């Protein structure tokens, strides 16, 4: 049985019995297609495929398939987890590599027999591994789950409300979204720090006070055409494309450097991208809350959580500590300083007193 202090039984989105206690997950548990040994074999096959892709140059360098060792500290060793197979799947970009290695290390310390599948190509590859039972835990984003995986068109306003909505909607798939982290890796616009001081802008609605010649933008091609993208965002702030001086459509990586170089004043970014501090950019507050919320949430197999609720105890020690500021720093160590994501993840766990070096 899972638990969360964030979902009281009085909440209309929580699942409670008539007595007000949390309902058992066994009422909707989805049994595995095969026994543990077959599942482990499939997981190892997928891990081998990911390693082959990496060797072929398809993806970022990471410690995929390996788990950096550490010793217990605030994260305790659980005898009940000794030898329990747990497969972690994470995607193939910097933040996910850091998070996947972070989760792999803490569960290894807690006693589980961990298979680390960080660097799995694409969101839907990671999602399918969870749905098929080839993976047990995935660091995910509430907005991704709600919009991309579950097919909803409109985001839910409010971090708690968005999480509760995706938690409830994914229950029939046998997946549990644990309480989210403060970290919200959503869309935003950023400006050079010195230019922000010159123009006096801190939030997006401040742009309404600027002269038209200062309204120059850099956006990626996909964002320019999304229904939660550029023109709908402008409309939410009472702007139209005709109000702008210039809009450059660029590749994602180029947007950051173009903004830092002054080719445009305002560049589309992701709020936890490690290039933001490295390029001395300021993220503007989305004060009208246009963009969907993408809070980090650990997604866990309901079967695993039902059998080993201590898994949530371990993950709940880490999730509340992961903020935008923390993730910006860790991502920057990889993207700007060239450090290995697995080492960055373990270093942070040590700094927080969660684990110790062996």
Image: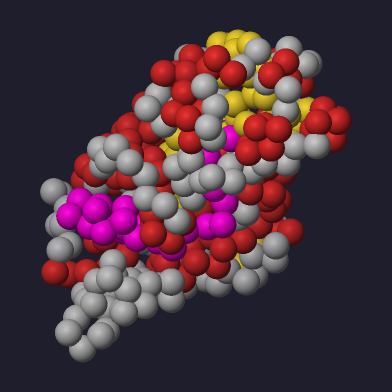
What x and y, as percent, mark residue 263?
73, 12
Please report the residue visible at 33 percent of the width from the left and 41 percent of the height from the top.
154
Q: Which residues, given as a range, are shown in magenta?
A: 164-188
Decide if residue 29 is in sight here: yes
Q: Is residue 229 left or right of residue 256?
A: left
Queried whether the magenta region covers residue 122, the answer comes back as no
Location of residue 12 (image quadrant):
bottom left
Residue at horizontal 86 percent and vertical 30 percent from the top? 198
Report the front residue among 10 and 149: 10
Query: Residue 278 location, x and y as percent?
Result: 78, 31
At horizontal 21% and vertical 88% (from top left) the residue drawn is 19
Q: Is residue 173 magenta?
A: yes
- The residue under the point 41% across, 66% down is 311
The answer to whether one can see residue 138 in this image is no
Q: Quadrant of the N terminus?
A: bottom left
> Residue 326: x and y, percent?
68, 50
Furthest-bottom residue in this view:
19
Query: Left or right: where does residue 88 sit relative to residue 133?
Result: right
In the displayed structure, would residue 168 be above or below residue 10?
A: above
Q: Is residue 312 above or below residue 255?
A: below
Vertical placement of 5 versus 222: above or below? below
Foreground of the two, 100 or 323: 323
Judge left or right: residue 170 versus residue 137.
Answer: left
Asked which quadrant contains residue 129, the reply is: top left
Quarter of the image with the C terminus in it: bottom right
Count the labels in the image.
0
Image coordinates for residue 34, horizontal then vertical, percent:
15, 49
Quick one: 308 or 44, which is closer to the camera?
308
């Amino acid at each position: 049985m899972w638990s969360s202090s964030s979902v009281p039984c009085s909440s209309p989105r929580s699942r409670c019995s008539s007595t007000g206690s949390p309902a058992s997950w066994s009422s909707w548990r989805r049994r595995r297609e095969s026994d543990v040994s077959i599942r482990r074999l499939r997981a190892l096959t997928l891990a081998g495929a990911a390693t082959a892709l990496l060797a072929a140059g398809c993806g970022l360098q990471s410690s995929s398939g390996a788990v950096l060792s550490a010793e217990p500290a605030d994260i305790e060793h659980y005898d009940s987890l000794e030898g329990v197979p747990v497969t972690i799947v994470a995607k193939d970009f910097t933040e996910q590599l850091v998070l996947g290695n972070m989760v792999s290390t803490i569960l290894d310390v807690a006693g589980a027999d961990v298979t680390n599948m960080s660097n799995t190509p694409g969101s839907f590859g990671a999602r399918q591994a969870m749905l098929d039972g080839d993976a047990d835990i995935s660091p995910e984003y509430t907005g991704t789950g709600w919009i991309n995986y579950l097919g909803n068109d409109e985001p839910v306003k409010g971090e708690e409300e968005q999480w509760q909505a995706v938690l409830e909607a994914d229950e029939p798939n046998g997946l549990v979204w644990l309480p989210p982290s403060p970290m919200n890796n959503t869309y935003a616009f950023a400006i050079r720090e010195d230019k922000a001081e010159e123009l006096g802008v801190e939030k997006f609605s401040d742009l309404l006070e600027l002269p038209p010649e200062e309204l120059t933008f850099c956006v990626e091609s996909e964002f320019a055409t999304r229904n939660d993208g550029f023109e709908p965002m402008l409309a939410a702030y009472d702007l139209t494309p005709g109000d702008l001086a210039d809009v450059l459509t660029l590749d994602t990586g180029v947007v950051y450097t173009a903004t830092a170089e002054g080719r445009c004043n305002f560049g589309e970014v992701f709020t936890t991208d490690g290039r933001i501090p490295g390029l001395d950019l300021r993220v503007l507050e989305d004060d009208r809350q246009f963009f969907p919320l993408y809070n980090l949430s650990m997604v866990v197999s309901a079967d695993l959580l039902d059998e080993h609720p201590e898994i949530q105890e371990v993950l709940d020690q880490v999730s509340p500590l992961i903020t935008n500021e923390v993730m910006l720093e860790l991502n920057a160590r990889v993207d700007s300083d060239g450090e290995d994501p697995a080492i960055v993840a373990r270093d942070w766990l040590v700094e927080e007193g969660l684990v110790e070096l062996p």
